[in-house]
Image (cartoon, rainbow, N blue to C red):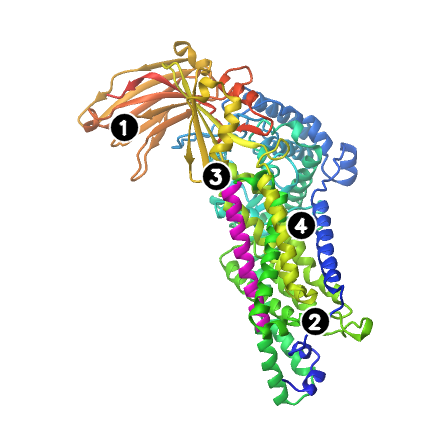
Amino acid sequence: MVSHTREETTPLLSRIVDTPAVPQQKNTTKLIYSYVFGFLLLLVAFIYNIRITLPTPLSDVQARELLDFPGIHCYNEYLSHFNQPHSANQKNNQAIKDWIVQLAHEFKLEATENGIDMEIIADDPTDLVSKRNKFSSDSVSTSHGVTDNGMGTAVAIELLRHFVQHPPQHTVIFLFNNFEEGGLIGADAFVRHPWFSTVKLFVNLEGTGAGGRALLFRSNILAAVHGLASSGARLLHASPLGNDLLQAKLLKSDTDYTTFTNHGVPGLDIAFYYPRSHYHTQRDDLAHTTPQSLQHMGQMALGSVLSIDGSDSIVEQAGAPEPVIYYDILGRVMLVYSFFTCQLINILSLVLVPLGLFTWFWFSTTANIHDKKALLKDNLVLVGKGLVAAVVALAFMVVFTALFAWIMILINPSVTYGGVNVVVAYLAVAAFLGLVASQWAMARFSGSFANNLANMQVGFYGLTGFWWLLLVVATYLGSQKVAAVYFAVYFLISSTLATLVLVGTRPKEIEGGSELAAGVTRFWSIAFMIQVLMPVILMTEFLLLGMDSMRHTTADGTPEGAIYVLLATPIILVVLHLLPWVHAAGQLQKTTCCTALVFVVLFIACLVSSPFNGDSSPNRIVFNQEYNASDALSTVALITGSSFGILQRTLKKALPLSEYETMVCESYLTYQTRCTYQTALTPVYARHPKKEISITHWPASCDAKACSLNITTTAENSLLCQLQFSNAKIQGLQAWINGNHVKAGQNESIRALTTYTKAQASAVHWDLLYDADQAQAVGDALFSCIYDDWTEGEIPAFTTLRDNLPYNALLTIKGGVGLAKVHYSPSIPLN
C-alpha cells in the first residue's frame, strides 16, 4: 500500500492507486446508464438527421445570385430526357447521343458569341480493339440509367452551359463516353485520343445507387481535393473508405477513374451510392431520384471544377497520382491532408501524449525522487491492469459479435440486406453484452482487478493505452497507404482529454458525503462527452456509409460475413469506450443479465425480419437468356445473393408450372445462387434467322505457312455480335475486324472475337489468319449476337418475368448489356 503522502501530492495519478470501492448510491447505476445511453442515442440521431439532409434545388435565378448550381434547371431540361433504357446495344442509345450532340452545337453558337473557342467531336474516329469476351455500356439495358449515369451526364451538361456563359481560364474537356459499365471501354478509347495527352487531371461523375448524397470516394490529387474543401460547396461528403473497399474487392464496381489513373492522370471520383438495391434495375428512373440529389452532386462537381480552373497552381503542378486522405465531419467541415502529414500527426501524438502525461506527473508533485519512482511503478501496474481489462473486453466483444453474426448467417442469411437497422441494434447489444460479461468475469476471477477497476480512472488509463496501441497499428497501415484508419488519432486525443478532466477535478459530493463512484468527479458528464463526441461522430459516419453502400452488395457476390464485419467494427470501437462507465455504474451481474434479455429479444427480431422489402431493399436478380436459334426452347439464368429457398419460393409464384418444373438451382461463385429454367419465350428477332442475319464466307486459302479466311456478317437488330471458336487454342491466330488488328499476347489465345457497330445492319468483315499446320484441327466458329431492346416486347421472357415478380424483387443485369444472347447455326467452318 502506498503512503498517504504520495496520494496527496500526486495530482495526476494519485487517485487511481488502490482506491477501495466506495458504497454507491442506490440510483447510481440507473443514473449513469440513463445519461450514457441517452447521450449516445441523441448524438447518433442527430448525426443521422444531418446525414439525410439534402440541399434545396436552386432555380437559374437563385443559382446566378449565389454563384451555385441550378439543380431545378438541370433536372427539368436535361435529366428529364433519360426516360427510356439506352444502353449501347439499344436503339435509344443513338437518340440520347444525338440529343447531346444537338445541345453541344447550340452551346457552341452561344460560346462563339461570348468569344469562347469550342470544338465538338460528335463521332470519335479513334479505333479501339478489345480482347474482352463481352462489352458493356454506360448505362444498363434493364434500367433508364437516371442515376447511373444520367445524373452525372446532366450535371456535366449543366457545367458545360456554365462555362459557355463564364469563360474558363483553362481548356476544359467534357467527355460523354459509352461502354463504361463493367468494361470501361469508352475510357480505354479516350486514352488513345490525341486530346488525352493534354489532360492534367479529371473529375469523374458516377452513380452506384439511385440518389441520396453524392460522395467523393476516390481521389489521388491533394491540391484538387483541397480546392473542393475550400470551394464553399455546401454539405460536402467525402470518405476514403470507398477506395479501401474497392481495393479489398469488397465493392464490386469500377469507374473510368481506374483507367485514367492507370495512365498516370490524377483526379476525383464523385458518385451516388444509396440505395444500391435500385442500381441497374427498373427503379433507376426519374421516379426514384430527386432534384435534391442532383443539386448535391451538381454543387460538389461545380465546386471542384471551379476551384481547379480558378487556380493556376492546381493545373500546372498536377503530377502523378498520389494517395490522399480526405473526410468530412457532418458535412460542415472537410479535412484533407497527405499521408505524410497523417503519419507525422500520428507519430507526434504517439510521442507527445505519453511524454506530456509523464511530464505532468513528474513535475506536479513535491515528493522526493524515490517516492516518485515508487508511485510511478505502482501506477504503471494499475495502468497495465486497465489495459488488460480493455484487451479482454475487446476479445469478448469480438467473439460475441462474430459468434452471433455467424449464427444469424446460418439461420437468416441476407437479413442485413433488408433488415439492417435491427441487425445494427442486434450487433450493438451483442457488443455491450460482451463488454459487461468480460468485466463481470474478470471481477469474479480476480478480486484485485475488481478493486482496481472500481476506480474509473484505471479504466480510462487502460483505454488511453489501448488507443495508443491502435494508433501504432494505424500508423503502420498508413505506411501501406490504407486511409480508412485516420480516426485512431481522434480516439487517443479524446480519451486523453477526458482522463485529464477526471483526474484534474475534485470528486463530486452527494448525500451522506460519499462519492457517486470511485474516481467520479462533478464533471463526469462532461468527461464522457469529451471522451465519445468525436469517436462517435466518426464511427457513426462509417457505420451509416457501410449500411447505405454495402448491405446491398451481397447481390453482387460480396460475402455476407464481410457486411457483418463492416457493421460490427465501428460498433465495437464505440462500445469499448464504455469500459470505465460499466464499473462506475456497478452491478455487473445484474447488467449482464438484463443485457442478455434485451439481446434475446433482438435475436428473435432478426430471425423474423425479411431480407427483402418493396421499399429500399428489393431483391436484385440478374437476368440472362441464351438461345440456340434452331431450338424450340431457350435457357434463362437467374443469379442472386439470396439462398436457394428464397429464390425458389419467389420463382414458384412467378413462373408457369411448365417452366418451374425445368428449374435447376446451384451455388454460384461461393456466395450466390444460380437458377436456370427452360422457356418457349424466345427472343423475337431470333425467330427469323434468315431475315435477322446474313453470313458470307469463303473456304480458307492456305500456303506453306498460313491459312487465311474471310467472313462477312450483318445483323439487322444488334450492334454487338461475336465469333466464338470451338478450338480455344488455335496456334498463331490473328484477326482483323473491319481492318483493326487483333493479336493474342504471349501465352494467350483468342477464344472469341466481339465487335460493336455504330449502326444496325452494318456489315462486319472478319479476316482470320492462322498457322497452316492447324488446318485440320482449327474447328469452326459459332456466330452469336446480343439483344437488349425489350420495351416493345422484343425479349418476352424478360418482360413476362419482370411483370410476374413480386414488388420486393427486381431484375438486373451483370455488365451493361447482354439480356439475350442468340447463337445462330450452322457454325462457320474455318478450314
Mark 4 and mark 3 in contact (Cβ < 8 Å)?
no
Mark nearer the N terminus (4 vs 1): 4
Which part of the image, by quadrant, shows the C terminus?
Answer: top left
Mark 2 and mark 1 in contact (Cβ < 8 Å)?
no
Q: Residue 727: horizontal and vertical position, in percent? A: 27, 28
Along the line of sight, which residue is nearer the eye, 533 or 271? 533
Mark nearer the N terminus (4 vs 2): 4
Identify the residue under disc 2: 500
Q: Residues within 10 Å of mark 2 (few under 14, many from 20)?
A: some
Rendered image: mark on residue 557: 3
Identify the residue under disc 4: 229
Rendered image: mark on residue 727: 1
Along the line of sight, which residue is nearer the eye, 822 or 132? 822
Mark 1 residue element = loop
Is the residue 326 above or below the residue 577 in the image? Answer: above
Closer to the eye: label 4 or 2: 2
Magenta-span inclusion, residue 406: yes
Closer to the eye: label 4 or 1: 1
Residues at marks 4 and 2, CA–CA distance in whole angstroms: 33 Å
What residue lies at 63% left-to-right and 88% top-to-bottom? 371
Residues at marks 4 and 1, CA–CA distance in whole angstroms: 56 Å
Residues at marks 3 and 2, CA–CA distance in whole angstroms: 47 Å
Which part of the image, by quadrant, shows the N terminus?
Answer: bottom right
